Amino acid sequence: MSFLSRIMVVKSKAHFSAGGNNHPGDLGMPFEGTRKKSSSQARSRVAIVIISFTAVYCVIGGRLVQYGLAKPDTVSSIGRADNLMASRPDILDRNGEILATDIRTVSLYAEPHKIVDADEAVEQLSTVLPNLNVAEIYNKLKSKSRFQWLRRQLTPKQQSEILALGIPGIGFRPEKRRFYPGGRTASHVLGHVNIDNRGIAGMERFIDSQGLADLAANGMTSNAKLEPVRLSIDLRVQNIVHDVVVDAMINYKAQAAGAVVLNAKTGEILAMASVPDYDPNQPSRTLPDGSIDKKYEEGWFSRMSNGTFEMGSTFKSFTLAMGLDSGKMTLKDSFDARFPIRLGGFTIKDFHGRHRVLTVPEIFQYSSNIGTAKIADLVSLDAHKEFLTRLGLLSKMDTELPEVATPSQPRVWKKINSVTISFGHGVSTTPLQTAIAGAALMNGGYLIPPTFLPRTEEQTAELAKQVVKPTTSADMRYLFRWNGIAGSGRSAQVAGFNVGGKTGTADKVINGRYSSDLNFNSFIAGFPIDDPQYVVLSIIDAPLTGESGGRIAGYTAAPMVQKIISRSAPLLGVEPKFGEDGSALLVSY
């Protein structure tokens, strides 16, 4: 390079240096700024994405925590268990013993939309639950609904075994179940409830009719502590009556049996039982083929209040009371019972005729159809009908129990009707109202409506109606006592308790015709008969045998009453009366 060229290069370098801020590298400054700006934007976008994902995961985590801490019923598709089944009050006997109460149980449900494999679920459940309707359960699990009941009221063992199966989509709901500690003992008095704990029979239904059902429908009983309902029933006496009627049905080879014990002064029912019966803890049964056991459900029928029967010779008590109350006869009168009565193609005769003139007490003692028919003939047809109506025997009985039948009678009363009704054929009534009418003949003449609730003397005084004269009641007590000593009531005697009563043996009505070899037997009694505190009535339907082989009431129904009184009288506080020599005292009139 020449000297001149070197000078020019030196000047050029000097020129660049003269600017002070200029630098050979400053030629790349625009590109460096662009890179810094792009990097900052990228970092911002990443931060936004991170924050967004963090927020989403926080929300999800929060909801998971919420679900984890929530009560099961807030997650399920159904409401709270307490809203599903309302509480019921306990039912107590007159002494405070529990007759019915609520207990906690669980029921199995499914949420079909959560079921993974319906076939497998059904197969697993069938290993635990007996008589499972496979097709029905499968259809429920495959339904598009969000909730289905699978089995109500499981046992703890069943719940444990189903839990062990680990089937997704099914669960348990706590419920309330009605429990009857006595089982069958008072089934026709207490009745039962349905699967939703609603009363559908007996006093359970009565309780609902008094407003409980309306309260439950409005959700006002779910957590309420309801006051118990106390009945007039005495559980001790109820057990005795139930035992006696069950044994009678078996031992006498009968189709049915029943009995009632009531307070003659207040109308309170202390015990009432009818067999066949049922267990209210299991009101229905399923047969192996899945059908309902109809024969078992026949036990729902209470013959004491819901069945009507021709009561036979117990009705002679009302006929004689009618004659005495009319003033047209006295205990000292006599009637000719030597010959049968022929009337309208019918012949009225005595079962064990004496073929002679009988006094009024003898008509009662020998249960003379002829003598009784002649007493009925003393009064008019209208007076006869009015008297039975006055005693409540021809109209539906008014009491708390829903299952009460209406008596039947001839549409038009003719003389033949009055004659046959006088000895208990031609009118059908319930055994319970027969006992109530019988009590009116013993307690001074007062008809007192029956009740299954406690009743005070003051309440009784407001309800009682004088239906026969006090003198008529005194005469009837004499007749009942006389029949207990010398007549068909001898087999009902209990030493020291002065039992008086009247048997009834009626031909059983089958398909509208009287059977020639089957009877419907009954016995009504009061004790102690000089001042009756309690009335007992028993029935036995179509017995094939009885005490000493006899099939009539004296060998079947009367011994039932004897067993009831001998066991229950001491519990009821009735003191026996014995003489100084230890023998039972007989009441004189």
Image (cartoon, rainbow, N blue to C red):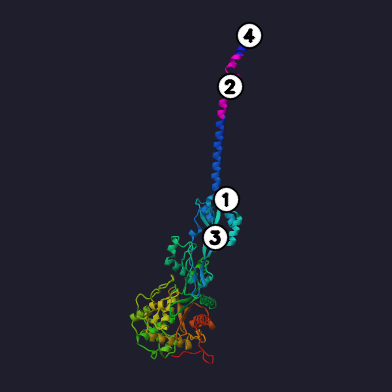
How many numbered marks have been drawn onto this rendered protein structure?
Answer: 4
Tag 3: amino acid: Val
Residue 495's disc is none
* Quadrant of the rendered image containing residue 362: bottom left
N-term mark: 2 or 4? 4
Residue that badge 2 annotates = 28
Main secondary structure type of the part rendered in magenta? helix
Residue that badge 1 annotates = 117
Labelled pair 1, 4 in contact (Cβ < 8 Å): no
* Residue 397 position in % (x across, y down): 40, 74
- Give yes or no for residue 481 being in the magenta stretch: no
Badge 4 marks a residue whose secondary structure is helix
* Quadrant of the rendered image containing residue 440: bottom left
Tag 1: amino acid: Asp
Residue that badge 4 annotates = 5
N-term mark: 2 or 1? 2
Residue that badge 3 annotates = 106
